[in-house]
Image (tube, rainbow, N blue to C red):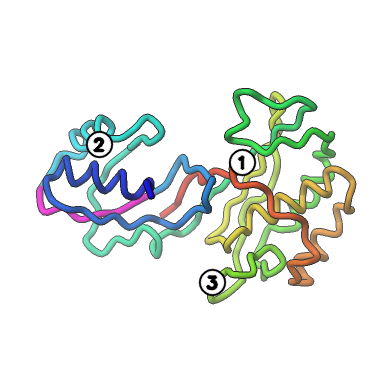
Amino acid sequence: ARTLQGVLEHALATALRHPVRVAASGRTDAGVHAMGQVVGFRSEHLVEPRDLRKSLNALTPPDMAIRDIAVVADGFDPRRHATARVYEYRIWNQAWRSAFWHRFTWHVPRALDLRAMRFAAAALAGRHDFSAFRASDCDSDSPVRHVTQSGFTEAEGLCVYRIEANAFLKHMVRAIVGTLVEVGTGQRPADSVGEVLAGRDRTRAGQTAPPQGLVLVSVRY
């Protein structure tokens, strides 16, 4: 199958004239987007980062962009050395679908109570066991994560949920968003989210939101 990793490795091999294997900061689910993915690779040649960036952007398709290239220490690991990751989930909250945003949002036509959703989202901040928002096949050793930001903004029909944590479990953000949307539509009270979190039971949380609304915004080091 054609993958982002495969396309990038082919472009790097063409530009550097030797095979290249990249290591990313983490995986995203199929259908999830990334604006700030970080990858590392080793090269046998000394190259000027700005020249390599220009070459790679010429060798890759328009749905991929290389924003920056930097030389790092030999032991740098994009995944293990990350201190935090930031995700955003976009909801198109209008009665009609968006011809522009449909590829990058979850269309929720029912009116959302954003005040209640903000109250519920705030309960997720801090260090918690997030088993209630974890996929059944998640293979992480521990369900404990430290969330430093969890909240909503709204502009021009878009509700944007932003969450920052030291790491994430499989489907964690999408399960959280699915639960918060149930709060926004009145299907569950806002204060129930804290109870769901404490209960550690995935069946008590909401649906897993569709992948296309989720974006990896940045990785911090």
Q: Label for residue 140? A: 3
Measuring from the top left, give residue 184's x and y in whole percent.
Answer: 83, 43
Q: Label for residue 56? A: 2
Q: Is residue 70 left or right of residue 218?
A: left
Measuring from the top left, give residue 79's x and y in whole percent.
Answer: 40, 61
Q: Are marks 1 and 2 in contact (CB under 8 Å)?
A: no
In the rendered image, residue 43 lying in the magenta stretch gets the answer yes
Amino acid at circle 2: Leu
Q: Label for residue 151? A: none
Q: Is residue 220 left or right of residue 15?
A: right
Under circle 1, the secondary element is helix
Name the quarter where the C terminus is drawn.
bottom left
Residue wearing tag 1: 213
Q: Residues in magenta?
A: 38-45
Check disc 1: other Cα within 10 Å, few if <14, some if 14-19, many if 20+: many
Measuring from the top left, give residue 48's x and y in whole percent.
Answer: 15, 39
